[in-house]
Image (cartoon, coloured by chain):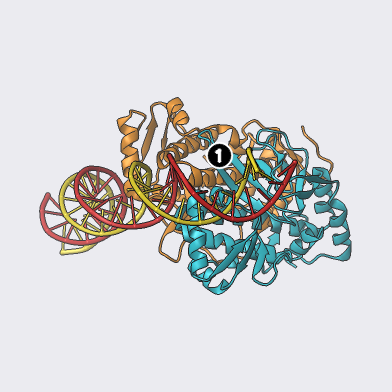
Chain colours: A cyan, B orange, C yellow, D red
Amino acid sequence: MDDAFLRKLRHGAGLTDEDERVLQDLAKPVRTVNAHADIAIEGSEPHHLPLILEGWAYRYKLLDNGKRQIISVFVPGDLCQPFGVVPQFLDYSLAALTPVTFAAIKLNAIGAAATSSPHIRKALWWDLLVTSTVERERIVSLGRRTASERLAHLLCELWARLNLVGLTDNAAYDLPLTQIELGDLLGLSSVHVNRLLQELRKAGLISLRGRRLVIHDLKEMRELSFFDDSYLQLQDHSRIAGSGFRRQ
Amino acid sequence: MDDAFLRKLRHGAGLTDEDERVLQDLAKPVRTVNAHADIAIEGSEPHHLPLILEGWAYRYKLLDNGKRQIISVFVPGDLCQPFGVVPQFLDYSLAALTPVTFAAIKLNAIGAAATSSPHIRKALWWDLLVTSTVERERIVSLGRRTASERLAHLLCELWARLNLVGLTDNAAYDLPLTQIELGDLLGLSSVHVNRLLQELRKAGLISLRGRRLVIHDLKEMRELSFFDDSYLQLQDHSRIAGSGFRRQ
DNA sequence: CGGTTGCTTGAGATCCATCAATAGGAGTGG
DNA sequence: CCACTCCTATTGATGGATCTCAAGCAACCG
């Protein structure tokens, strides 16, 4: 589904056919990497903005003590960097979790697209807002939620994000993260992740076999982790700056 | 110092006198709130972008279990929201840590400023980059650093950020956070923060009395917490999108 | 098949939270 | 100026959540 990006951005702003055409042309050139391959590494100078078309990727940082923290995971339709600026060097690495196809968008191209249409500009800003909100929610999870709340919250978050781009099958979706990777994302050891998953299974809340997750009781999972999807800003009413553009 | 914002942005881009004049005019209207007062609360619709002129503020979230996570702290010169968009409602609250004076910048005004000058646009994007990088580093701390590393890292981070805007006095600065607030920021209990501070004091690394912090051995503090300020992107070479503008 | 990777389980250790009590300051009103 | 209160800092004791180490197993793959 190379239109996951469009599906997602439509939640952020009303897009005209012309807008959608412009956005579709943007997603070039397309590249492919193998599972577990690095897309960009810490300290390197980025030359483009990666937009995930297919597969999952993740942003991570390796610490001096040998530990790893996964900062964000990216699913199809996710833009992996803010659209308006490219840093001199990356402060994190970006890698593929599965085989990934992504568009290496040129900064000038996306800048021109944003300039050309207020709807596109609005949608891109909305996307940036959602991305940073998800990261903030990760801070809350790591700082003040228990391990089981964290895990359940993550599974709910991923369901909501995948649902946004049509990659859920009712309450089921493909979850390509190993328990080690889940641990590095949740700030836990893989052993503990294993035990938490078993608890959720025993409670009849989920099934997880062979990278396929089924959430049997989404409502209960949400209550258990105090998950509230309003932070994803799915109702679109944000306002953007620039060129006298006002709320639609 | 109402020019902390300018001092900060100069690190992000070369600014002309005209740029600086525009930015200075932007910081209006100015408001004041008492210590511990909310500036904006979760769920409300924001009408402006708060820019801290004096004092410290913080972004936090209250959980259903009664706990609080402080997501970011803002010091003079910090813009508390991305400059290009205002969400429909806030997913967090913003409050004053000390008495705070801040500018309530209108979205249109900052948008116009960004449109008017590529340098301003670049500086604002750079600021956004730094803000999100600091938040990512918080994720790393909460997920994979020990409690003492977290604390030492925070003290180094704050030193670097305050130094950027001229609010350090060599290796000393005013730290208006209580131990409870430090705990809510670091994902720790205030009791444990207390003990960690004592360890740092006993090791001769810091003094902290009456909201005044002195770091006696900045080098050692950095090593102890694996602090590397490169993530703050102080050397400015980022590139921004739009209007054919290229790297300077 | 042998090797690799990921999952599972057990046992013990540790970090950090929680509970509880005391003490110091800062403000407030009489 | 004193009595009172509130908030913060401090200290001790205890328990629990989670980590680490270690071993066995299942699945996959060249």
B247 w.r.t. A203: above or below? above
A180 w.r.t. B214: above or below? below
Residue at 80% across, 46% down: A32
A64 w.r.t. B62: above or below? above
Residue A102 in the image, given as x and y percentages of width and height: 78, 49
Closer-to-camera residue (B43/B9)? B43
Instruction: Say if residue B40 shows up in the picture.
Output: no
Q: Which residue is mark 1?
A: B4
Residue at 48% across, 64% down: A199
User: What kind of residue is marked 1?
Assistant: Ala
Quarter where residue A246 is shown? bottom right
The N terminus of chain A - image quarter: bottom right
Closer-to-camera residue (A200/D2)? A200
Which chain is mark 1 on?
B
Residue at 75% across, 59% down: A123
Residue A108 in the image, given as x and y percentages of width and height: 82, 44
Query: Left or right: where does residue A71 sit relative to residue A192?
Result: right
Residue at 71% across, 41% down: A37
Residue A46 in the image, given as x and y percentages of width and height: 74, 37
Q: Residues within 10 Å of mark 1 (few under 14, many from 20)?
A: many
Instruction: Say if residue B223 shows up in the picture.
Output: yes
Query: Left or right: where does residue A174 sit relative to residue A120?
Result: left
Quarter where residue A157 is shown? bottom right
Closer-to-camera residue (A217/A149)? A217
The C terminus of chain A - image quarter: bottom right
B223 w.r.t. B51: above or below? above
Query: Left or right: where does residue A135 sit relative to residue B176?
Result: right
Residue B134 in the image, given as x and y percentages of width and height: 56, 43
Secondary structure under the numbered disc 1 in the rendered image: helix
